[in-house]
Image (cartoon, rainbow, N blue to C red):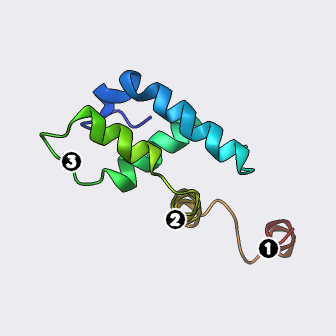
């Protein structure tokens, strides 16, 4: 979890909404999504621009309306940015394309 985000104080209050969204992702076949991964998506993408007067209900609404495709796109881009693999290595290409 990112330590410096302004909405982190909401985390414990919205945990049931996060768990509900994670259960929805798992029902759709996305077992690998974690609570911290979802929170990171929200803080780094959805809530990139902090609103000082945001209400708890808006935070919960944002969590419950996360689309799987938005989350997957975010994690894919983050993977490319972190670039932990070497595209010049043929074995890594084979692993990537499995």
Residue 93 rendering spot, x and y as whole percentages: 81, 73
Which residue is found at the position 71% from the left and 51% from the top?
Answer: 28
**In the picture provided, is 81 more to the left or to the right than 88?**
left
Which residue is found at the position 36% from the left and 54% from the top?
Answer: 46
Q: Name which quarter of the figure residue 96 lies in.
A: bottom right
Q: Nearer the viewer, residue 25 or 11?
A: 25
Q: Name which quarter of the figure residue 1 lies in.
A: top left
Res 81 label:
2
Structural distance between the alpha carbons of marks 3 and 1: 41 Å
Determine the residue located farthest toward the left in the rendered image.
53
Q: Which residue is mark 1?
A: 89
Q: Residues within 10 Å of mark 1 (few under 14, many from 20)?
A: few
Disc 3 is placed on an element classified as loop
Residue 87 rendering spot, x and y as whole percentages: 71, 75
Res 50 label:
3
User: Closer to the observer: label 3 or label 1?
Assistant: 3
Res 14 label:
none
Q: Is residue 43 visible?
A: yes
Q: How many marks?
A: 3
First-in-chain label (3 vs 2): 3
**In the picture provided, is 82 more to the left or to the right than 85?**
left
| Vertical side of 17 occupied by 64: above or below | below
Disc 2 is placed on an element classified as helix
Which residue is found at the position 47% from the left and 52% from the top?
Answer: 66
Q: Nearer the viewer, residue 79 or 50?
A: 50
């Amino acid at each position: 979890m990112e330590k410096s985000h302004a909405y982190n104080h909401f985390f414990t209050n919205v945990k049931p909404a996060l768990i509900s969204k994670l259960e929805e992702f798992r029902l759709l076949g996305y077992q690998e999504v974690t609570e911290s991964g979802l929170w990171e998506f929200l803080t780094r993408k959805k809530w990139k621009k902090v609103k000082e007067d945001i209400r708890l209900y808006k935070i919960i609404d944002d969590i419950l309306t996360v689309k799987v495709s938005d989350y997957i796109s975010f994690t894919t881009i983050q993977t490319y940015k972190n670039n932990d693999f070497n595209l010049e290595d043929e074995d890594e290409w084979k692993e990537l394309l499995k």
